Image (tube, rainbow, N blue to C red):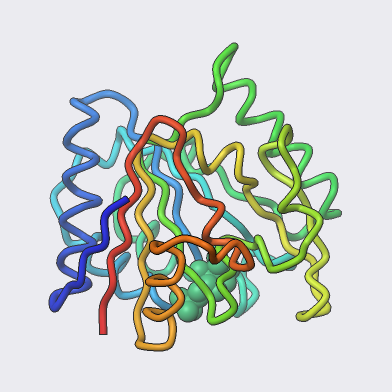
Amino acid sequence: MELVNSSRFVRDAVNRIAAASVAAGGGPFRLSLCGGGTPREIYRALAEEDLDWKNFIITFGDERCGAPDHEQSNYRMIREALLDRVAIPEENVLRLKGEITPAKAADEYEKLLRQRAGDEVFRHDLLLLGMGEDGHTASLFPAAQVLEERDRWVVASEVTKLSAWRLTFTYPLINASRRVLFLVRGDSKRRIVEQIIHGGADCYPASGVRPEDGTLVWLLGQ
Ligand code: 6PG
């Protein structure tokens, strides 16, 4: 686990994503994108890079249930900031269908990943995560049942505090990644990250992100 304090947060994030894509060596680059507000400017800057976009396979670590053009949709934010501006083949953008029944959307996505993974676990080359002020990540919120999930890779979860349904990757899928990069800004979140890194912060769902055979980097910005 590495903590990187960055004074060039967006640039450092873009450089790390670009480097991971180059490390894929011309083969498929499985990249999972996180939602929320922090990554928007990172995705915008990433779209300016000259990368092997045709090799990118995009997944979404979580999604708010609702239409893909809803103002709260992670897919909409990612499409506007990145996907509409780079040449990733449409069939390589594996969208979480927030507009259909949550359980059905989760089942469909799980089946899609398992088909692509064959007999293995679906391993992302790079999985991006944000973190909320309560230590949630993806849509893994404190005290949620989904935190106990050890078999499924994608589930639908009703987030009590938001009175809303979410679709989210689970720890088994997240922790199968080759690289996990947290993108976190702000002093209040910094204190949570430091508690997580020093251990004993199991109350924060982000503390459950521990890649089994991969790297974990916390990129902290102002
Ligand atoms: C979401 C995200 C969520 C996000 C955190 C941080 O759908 O909201 O996936 O996990 O990363 O809430 O969000 P900010 O970057 O906006 O603080």
The image shows a total of numbered marks equal to 0
Residue 149 at x, y percent in the picture = 75, 43
Quadrant including the C terminus: bottom left
Using the rendered image of the protein, determine whether residue 76 is visible from the camera's viewpoint.
Answer: no
Q: Is residue 137 above or below residue 93?
A: below
> Relative to 216, is 166 on the left or the right?
right
Comparing 107 with 180, the one in front is 180
Residue 125 at x, y percent in the picture = 36, 36
> Relative to 105, is 210 on the left or the right?
left
> Relative to 198, is 147 on the left or the right?
right
Comparing 220 with 159, the one in front is 220
Residue 181's quadrant in the figure? Answer: bottom left
Residue 126 at x, y percent in the picture = 36, 43
Residue 19's quadrant in the figure? Answer: top left
At x 66% / y 38%, what residue is drawn? Answer: 153
Question: Residue placed farthest to the top in the image?
Answer: 119
Residue 151 at x, y percent in the picture = 73, 32
At x 39% / y 43%, what residue is drawn? Answer: 31
Q: Is residue 66 above or below residue 118?
A: below
At x 27% / y 23%, what residue is drawn? Answer: 27
